[in-house]
Each structure stands twice: as structure tokens, then as C-alpha cells.
Image: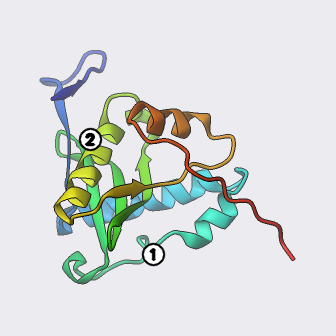
Amino acid sequence: MTWLNIPNPPCEPQPVTAVQAAGDHLDEIRALAQEARGELAGRKGGESLRTELPEIVGRTSDLSTSDLVLIAGLVGEDVLGYGALRIRESTADLLEIYVTPEARGVGVGTRILESAKGTAVAANCVTLDSVALPGDRHTKNFFEDHAMVTRKLVVQTRL
């Protein structure tokens, strides 16, 4: 278990965990999804990636009928990150992983990734794929720190 250490905490340090998102997490995940999409603006490849992301912001229905598995990254009871996972045959795609800036570096992303891996294994997947934008060294390093390696680069031009 990882603990978030903040100066003069109001109470005990809070545990960092990740769980499959439930109804009470959705409003917070929607807000984080808007924040994540805002961070993509102006990044190399960001606009293209935004068009490929699943609809989370406007999602209002129960996730049990969805093809997505949403994972809530928690510090205590607060949702400070999320992952969006899609299972397709033997591969799971981690379409999104996002942690709000103030919670980066304390293990929220790691817990989300671990949960995604566990969900993929339970679904009999043999691989887990995700993406990092060109020049996003922080995300690439995060994935490499968790034994994920680049297996292909996708290039594109507008016609």
C-alpha cells in the first residue's frame, strides 16, 4: 500500500488504491476526463488522439452494459485518476490513463495500471496495449517503468 504524504495533513495519510469505477465515481471521472482532454490541446498528436478517445464525458448510463471498464484511482475516497480499458479478444487496450497533476508521483497511476493488468488477465488477455504521444517522455517513462515497451510507432499525414 502506498501513502500520500502531504505537509501538515489534516488526518492520517491516505491509502492509494484503484477499483473498478462504480456509479458514485462517475461524476468525478467525467470531470477528470474533461481535464485530460484539455491537457491534450496543443500537444503533438493530441488532437488526433482526442478524436479516438471513448466517450466518457457525456456518459450517463450504467457502466455494466458498456464495452469499457473504467477504473477509478483513489487517494482515500477521492478519485484523482482514472483508466479506460477495452477488452478485445486476447488484447486489452488501456485507451486512457490519467492522474490529476497534484496526485502524480504518489502511485495513483501505478495502481490504475495494476488494476488494468488484473482485469485483462481475468479476461484471458495475453497483452495490454496503450499509447503515449510523441515527445511525452513522462508517459513513456511511466510505461517503461512498468515493463511496457514500444512495439510500433504510428505515423500520419493529413490529405
Give the answer, above or below, for where 88 lies relative to 16. Answer: below
Q: Give the foreground label among 2 and 1.
A: 2
The mark that comes first in sequence, 2 or 1, is 1
Residue at the outermost top position: 8
Q: Secondary structure at mark 2?
A: helix
Residue at 42% across, 31% down: 145
Give the answer, above or below, for where 60 lies relative to 35. Answer: below
Residue at the outermost right position: 159
Report the residue marked by disc 1.
55
Could you classify mark 2 by the number of other residues whose Cα lies within 10 Å: few (under 14), some (14-19), or many (20 or more)? Answer: many
Return the x and y of residue 117 as percentages of the image width and height: 27, 51
The CA distance from mark 2 to mark 1 is 23 Å
Is residue 138 rendered to the left or right of residue 83? right
Per the rendering, the mark at residue 111 is 2
- Quadrant in which the C terminus is drawn: bottom right
Say which of 14 and 86 sits in front.
86
